[in-house]
Amino acid sequence: MLLGAFVDLGVPLEEITTQLNKLPISGFHVEKSQGLRNEISGTKVDVVLDDPVNLAASTMLQIVSDSSLSEFVKSSSLRIFHLLWDAECRVHGHSLEEIELDELGTLDTIVDIVGVCICLDYLGVENVYASPLVLGSSRPPIRPGGYSNPAPATLQIISQVKAPVVADNEIYDNIGELTTPTGAAIITGLATFVRPAVSVSAIGVGLGGKDPESFANIIRVWLGEISSESVVMQSGSVLLETNIDDSSGEMLGYAKERLFDLGALDVWFTSIQMKKDRPGVILSALVPLEMESLAVDLILRETSTLGVRRRVIDRYVAEREIRSISTDLGEANVKLKFLNGVVVDVSPEYEDCRSLSLRTCIPLQDIMRKVRDTARNQLGLD
C-alpha cells in the first residue's frame, strides 16, 4: 500500500525497478494498477515472485548491505529490517542467525521495505510523520486456527517503540489484519507520530488488497514542506485538568513526575478554594493528542480525583535550538529562542548548570549568569 501511494504520488515505477535492480537478487517484478476503494481512486502495487524462495533474516540483511544502493536507502532499510527481525526473534525465541519465517522470508519483504526507502530518497524527503496505526479487528484469525490480529510481531514492534494506535471501531469488525509486521516496522522505523504545520503540495493514495464496504482501505501519503516561520501554530495537543483537595504534596509531585516521563509537554498546579472553603489545587497537564488516554489513566490512578476535564488546544510555538557553550568552568547547553531568524533569548539548561555548581562549589545563580553571559557574547548579542 505504501509503494502504491508513492507511485500514485508521482514516483515512477521504472525508477523503483531500476533501483531495486541494484540488489543482488532476481526472480521478481513489480506491477501497478488503478482502482477504487469506496469511490476513492488510487494506485495498487503488487510484487510478483517467479519463485517464492525463503531467505534467512541474516541473508536479507546481507543482501541490502552488499547492494550498490545509496547510503540513505541502505541505512534506512537496515534500520527497518533490524526492527522487524528483532521483534520476530523476541516473539519466537530465536536468534537472528536461527530465525526463518515463511511469509516474511520471501523477496517481497525486501522489495516492500527497500522500495519505500527508494521512494523517500527519490523525493528528497528529510522527515517522515505518521498518524496512529490502525490495527483492524481480532477476527478472523490471521490463519485458520491460528493467532488473532494483531500479529505477535506487529504488537511487539508497537510496544518496542511505544507507537500510538487508534481505538477500536465497529467499522473494522471482522476485517482482520490492517497493519502487518512489515508495515508496522516501516512506519515506526521511519516516522515520528506527530502532525507538524506543513504546506501540502501533493497526495498519493495506495490501495489495499481488501475492499470492505464499511471504510476505504487506503493509505495516503502527503508530500509538503514544514513551515519555515519562526513562530508556528501547532495543533494536536490536549489540556487535561482536574480539581484535587485530598492528595498529599508528595503524591501530586509524583504524578507530575510521571506525566513528564510519559511525554507531557507541560504540567503545573494552581491553588484554588474548593467546596466548604477547603484549599485545593488544579492539576493541569498539556499532552500530545496521541497520549491523551495514557495521561488520563495515569492521573486517575496516581491521584484521588474521580474525573478529568479535557480541552483541545492550539499553540503558537517559537523556533528553538539547543546549543553547547564552552566556559572556563566547563561545557553547558543553552536553549536559544528565535523570532524571524534572530536569537531573542538565551536560557541556560538547569541540569548542566547544576552539575557545574556542584563540581565547582560556585552558587548556581552565578553559574547560570556566567553561562548566559558567555553564550550571549559568543553569539554577538551584547
Image (cartoon, helix red, strand yellow):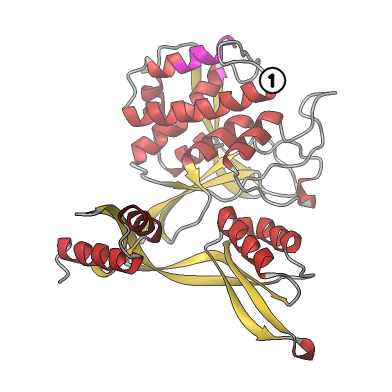
Q: Vertical placement of 282 versus 156: above or below?
A: below
- Could you tell whether 259 is left or right of 378 in the image? right
Residue 209 seen from this side: no
Q: Residues within 10 Å of mark 1 (few under 14, many from 20)?
A: few
Q: Residue at x 61, y 20 (%)?
A: 104
**Residue 290 visible in this rendered orientation of the protein:** yes
> Toward which corner of the image does residue 368 lie, by quadrant?
bottom left
Q: Is residue 257 magenta?
A: no
Q: Quadrant of residue 304?
A: bottom right
Element under label 1?
helix
Task: Choose between 41 and 129: the one closer to the eye.
Answer: 129
Across and down, in percent, residue 3 comes to 50, 34
Measuring from the top left, give residue 328's x and y in whole percent: 19, 54
Residue drawn at (65%, 43%) of the image: 217
Q: Name the foreground residue: 136 vs 353.
A: 353
Is residue 243 rendered to the left or right of residue 123? right
Disc 1 target residue: 92
Residue 297, x across and y down, in percent: 72, 58
Q: Quadrant of the C terminus?
A: bottom left
Residue at 77% across / 41% down in the picture?
A: 137
Q: Left or right: 87 with respect to 354?
A: right
Q: Nearer the viewer, residue 344 or 273?
A: 273
Image coordinates for residue 248, horizontal then vertical, percent: 70, 70
Asked where in the image residue 268 lies, by quadrant, the reply is bottom right
Q: Amino acid at mark 1?
A: His
Up/down of 29 relative to 166, above or below: above
Residue 322 as seen in the image, left or right of residue 91: left
Quarter of the image with the N terminus in it: top right
Magenta segment range? 48-61
